[in-house]
Image: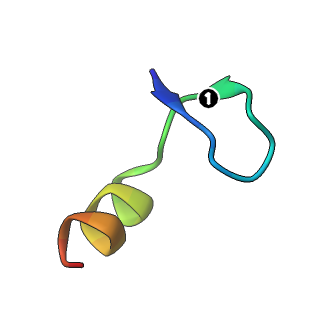
Amino acid sequence: MLSCVDCGAEFVWTAGEQLFFADK
C-alpha cells in the first residue's frame, strides 16, 4: 500500500503506475 498524494488515501498501485513513477 502506498500513500495517494492527490487523495491522501491509501491504494494499491497497478504495475503500470509503479513503472511510471519508478521511471521518474
> Which x, y percent locates residue 7?
81, 42
Eyeballing the image, is 6 above or below 17?
above
Q: How is the image coloured?
A: rainbow
> Which x, y percent locates residue 21?
33, 67
Residue nearer the viewer, 15 or 11:
11
Eyeballing the image, is 16 above or below 14?
below
Residue nearer the viewer, 21 or 5:
5
> Which x, y percent locates residue 8?
74, 34
Q: Residue at x 61, y 29 (%)?
A: 11
Q: Residue at x 43, y 61 (%)?
A: 17
Quadrant location of residue 20?
bottom left
Q: Residues within 10 Å of mark 1 (few under 14, many from 20)?
A: few
Amino acid type for the residue under numbered disc 1: Phe
For label 1, the residue is 11
Q: Is residue 9 left or right of residue 12?
A: right
> Which x, y percent locates residue 3?
54, 31
Eyeballing the image, is 19 above or below 3?
below
Outermost residue, bottom direction?
Answer: 24
Disc 1 is placed on an element classified as strand
How many marks are shown on the rendered structure? 1
Outermost residue, left direction?
Answer: 23
Which quarter of the rendering shows the C terminus? bottom left
Q: Residue at x 73, y 27 (%)?
A: 9
Q: Residue at x 45, y 21 (%)?
A: 1
Q: Is residue 5 left or right of residue 1?
A: right
